[in-house]
Every structure is written in C-alpha cells, then in structure tokens.
Image (spheres, rainbow, N blue to C red):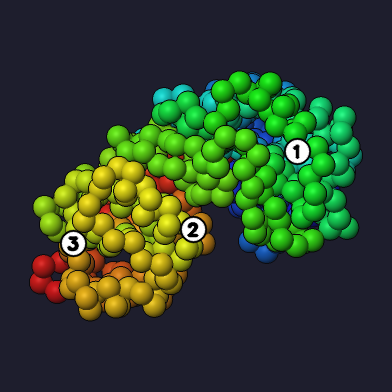
Amino acid sequence: MMQKGDQVQIAVDRLAYGGRAVGRVNGLVVFVTAAAPGDVVLARVGRVRRSYAEADVEAVVTASPDRAVPRCPHFGPCGGCVWQHIAYPAQASAKEAVVRESLAHLGGLTDARVDPIVAADDPWYYRNKMEFSFHPDGTLGLHRRGEWNRIVPVETCFLQSVESASLVNAVRAFARQHGPAAYDPRTHEGFLRSLVIREGRGTGDRLVGIVTSSGAFAHAGEFVQTVRAAAPGVTGIVRGIVGGASDAAPIVQVDTLYGREYLEEELVGLRFRIGLETFFQTNTVQAARMVEHVVKRAQPAAGGFVIDLYCGVGTFALALARAGARLVGIELAPSSIEAARKNAALNGVEGVEFVCGDTRVVLPSIIARHGTPDAVVLDPPRSGAGGRVMRKIGRTGARRVIYISCNPTTLAPDLKELLPFGYDLSGVQPFDLFPQTYHVEAVAVLDRRTEV
C-alpha cells in the first residue's frame, strides 16, 4: 500500500482543474505537481487518502512531447503561472477536457455538447491588470506558489506588458530608498500593501495604484515621480487606503495623486471607465470574443426583454442593449452599478436599466414589473450562483438562459438546477482567457422546451 514518503513511477495521462497532473499507481489516482500529460515521472508521495494521493515530481523519466521549457526565470516558485512547462496547445486542450469532465461528473450532463475551445492567439502579455504585493523584507512581487506570506521578487513577467515589469522594478527601488514599512500579514502592521497596474489594451491608457494602510503618505510626491519616469504618459496614479489592520480589510478610500482616477478601455466598440477596484475581464482580446458570442447566442430581438444578473459595470449588458435588447442589469455592488450607468451614458446606450441589489431579492420584483424575459444572462463569481438563484431563474420561464462561468466545478451543479424547470443544455463554448494557468471560462446556453 502506498505511504507518505514513497517514491513511485507514474505515467501521467491528463491535467486536472486546479493545475495538477493526474496519473494512477496500482489503480489509485495520484495528483502530481509539475508534470505534463504524457510524462513518465518519478514522484515523492506527500499525502495519501482513501481515494487519491498527492505527489511531487523528483525526476522526469520520459518527457512528454507536450512538455515545454518555461519562458520565465521565476516559474516554479512564483504563483502567477502553473502551466508554463506545458505547450500552449496542450494547455488549451486540457481546459476543454476539464469543462467536459466537470459537466459529466459534477452535473450528470454526460451528453453535453462542448464545442472546441476558443484559444488565445498569443498566450503571453495578455493581462490588462496585475497586482503585486510588498513584503517587509523589501520585496515587491507575486506570492510564492501556495504560500500566503512569502513573495517572489519578480524582475520580469510575461503575463502583463513589458512596461509593467519595468514599473514594478522602479517602484521596488522607490520603496527601498524611501523606506515606508511594508505591511506584514503575520503582525497586521505596516504601510505599503500592494501595487496595482491596469492597462487599456484598446486605448493605451494606464492606471497605477498603490494600496496602503491609513495614515500620511509622506513620500507620495516621490512615488508619483517614480511612476511617471518609469511609465511616461501614464493616465492616472491613485492611492487606495485600506480601512483596517487585517490583510482582508477592504479599500475604503481612493485618492487621486496624478491625472485621472480611472482609465478607459475599449471592448467590442464600447468604452468602459475602469477604476482601481473595478471588476473587468482581464484578457481584453478574449473577452471581446466572449461578449460577441453571448450577444449572438442571446439573439436579442428589437425590444426583446433581457435580464443580466451579476452585471458588473455593464460589459455584457451594454453590448446586448446596443444589439436591440430592452435590458435590466442587476448587481450587488453600488460602485459597479454607478459605473454601469456612467458607461451607458458614455456610450449613448439607451433602453437599459441598472438595479442595485441581491439577485435573490430583486429578481422576482423585476419579473413582476417587466414580465417573462426572452433571455437571462448571468456571470456569477467563481463560487457560482448557487441553487437558490438558479431555481429563481428557472421560475422566470425565460426562453433562454446564458451562463458565463469562470469555474467549471460550480458551473456544472448550477446548470443541473435548471433542468427540472424544463431546460435543455444546448451547448457549451469554452474560452481561454488565462493562458499559463488552469483557469477556463465557459459560456453555457440552455433553452426551455416549448411543451413545458
């Protein structure tokens, strides 16, 4: 019987959601770090459970044809990427398979049609937002893989732009020279917490934010000079102030140190204003493809009624309204609703209403006021919408439901909740918005049977 500390040889056959590879030893499933599908590896067992074990690769006996040389010198310790050692086509294929397997095993949707994944044209330099953390030892970088209190001092990064890496290095030097104490997650003391860099890929705008604890920022002027020298033409520089000592405390105030407090991004011909905390899809190019797909599948007739749940700043809502839908967007965060309204005005989009509130509470009142929707679109957080929300959607009687998911393990059980209300899963389209990671987006379309 396998025990902790054993060295075992494993033939790896696939990748799992969460980033690890999967193989079997004497019939027992083993999750392996740092392996590629098709590898044969020697691995050291770290944990053994009744139905699975976990192990770390110590040597590659036979390398998979899909194994690649990681491009980044920080790959391995750095938690920003987990799949740089795997060729990108194999990454995309694995994500498509993960969506299919999750639907079958977690939702019982064994016959679901999953279309070929929409892979990224360029799997590098795709992120329009990155957040780097300060550490009391003078480090500024990304968290070490699996460690919340240690930071890798990245000198370069292939996820955002080349300019962003230069900016990180300049701000690190600023922090070491001027010496504001960095926040320590163990003691909950310190001033500098994180550096946020946001870029408008369609506009060229750049917003730089420094997140700190409360109190005077004595070297704010030097910080602005540092950023402007490292990023000429920066659109805005802001400071986000955290309201408590805890590392989980929210930002309670944003001060503009230079320029504007927002940047503008362009997506499918629409412009969006994005602030320090605004949620916006991280991969602009792939997000545009996903929005176009949602509009195409929603088929909004002129004046047709569509509800957009978890609407955020209006990314899908404005595109649907521009296509002719009479639309109501629902979102819990007041700041997002305010931004969505401003974005509608900025783009001259009419026929759209944004309502602030909890979906479970607001949705019935929207139906009472507007009647049965032609379509319900939802883009819930990674934790999913949950059974209560899905059942409320089912009771709307909407002709079509379009679910945009960032987590296939919550997508599957959520979709299962709709089936008793007379819905059939018409198809699922995966999109890869996060190359070099295990994350995958998927758009599921469900149609209500006419005989219900």
Q: Is residue 238 left or right of residue 426?
A: right
**Does residue 272 show up?**
yes
Q: CB atoms at circles 1 and 3 under 8 Å apart?
A: no
Q: Which of the two residues, 153 or 448, is positioned nearer the viewer here?
A: 153
- The residue mark sitting in front, 1 or 3, is 1
Residue tagged 3: 305
- The residue mark sitting in front, 1 or 2, is 1
Q: Secondary structure at mark 1?
A: helix
Residue placed at 34% from the left, 61% from the top? 354
Could you tell me residue 159's position as x and y percent? 58, 30
Q: Quadrant of the C terminus?
A: bottom left
**Does residue 438 show up?**
no
The quarter holding residue 112 reads bottom left
Residue tagged 1: 220
The first of marks 1 and 2 along the sequence is: 1
Disc number for residue 335: 2
Disc 1 marks a residue whose amino acid type is Ala
